[in-house]
Structures are given as structure tokens and as C-alpha cells.
Image (cartoon, grey):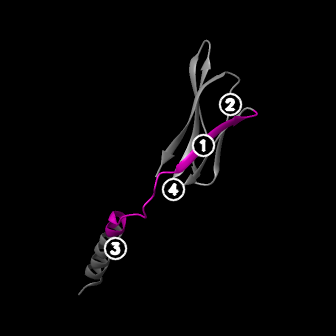
Amino acid sequence: MSLRRHLTGLAATGVLCLGAAALAPSPAMAAPTGCTTWLSNGYAYSQCTGGTGEHSVAVEQWHPYAGPILVTGDWKPAGAVSSARLTPWTVKRVWVNKRG
């Protein structure tokens, strides 16, 4: 068998292995649970106590001329705190975005 055939076969095997790995299921993630939000000193915070996914604090504020302002924090794993710096305008609502 020629070297070219060996290399072609080896390349094909590698592609099949990588494709199978990409289709394999990933470890299960559960959306965060036990989430709370709070505001303090110009920041919004969220923390979730359960689950294995991630969460992010989100805030809708209102500017009298520009309208709604959306402020979001970084995605953090359950147990960690997500924070976002607020603008000086009125806070309309605060919630937790979840993924996983």
C-alpha cells in the first residue's frame, strides 16, 4: 500500500473521530435555582444558590428622553454573584437571566 493511501486513511479516521466527539452529549446542566436580586450603592446584583448553569443580573432603567435602558451583568456560575453598574436614571425592574 502506498504512503498516500495510508495518509488518506489516517486523515479519514481522524475526521470520523472528531465528528463523533462533536456529536457526543455534553454533561447535563440545570438552570440556576434559588436566585435573588438586590440593589446597593449604584449596582445591581444577582446570586443563585442551586443548579449548574449560569446567571446574569439584568435591569431595565428609564431615561426621560431616551426611553428604556438595559443594563446587564456578567454571566456567573451558580453560587457566584453577578453585578452591573447602574446609570443614574429610574430603575423600572430587575430580573435574573439564566442559561444551562
Q: Give the structural element (helix, strand or loop) at label 4.
A: loop
Local SS, label 3: helix
Residue 12, given in percent of the width and then of the height, sits at 28, 73
Q: Is residue 39 above or below residue 100?
A: above
Residue 36 badge: 1
**Sequence-wise first label, 2 or 4:** 4
Q: Is residue 70 left or right of residue 21?
A: right
Determine the residue positioned at 57% across, 46% down: 35
**In 3D space, how far apart are the residues under numbered discs 1 and 3 (Cα atoms)?**
47 Å
- Circle 2 sits on which residue? 86
**Magenta segment, which residues?**
19-41
Crowding at label 3, few (<14), some or many (≥20) Cα neighbours within 10 Å?
few
Name the front one of labels 2 and 4: 4
Residue furthest out toward the bottom: 1
Q: Which residue is mark 3?
A: 14
Q: Earlier in the sequence, mark 3 or mark 2?
A: 3
- Mark nearer the viewer, 3 or 2: 2
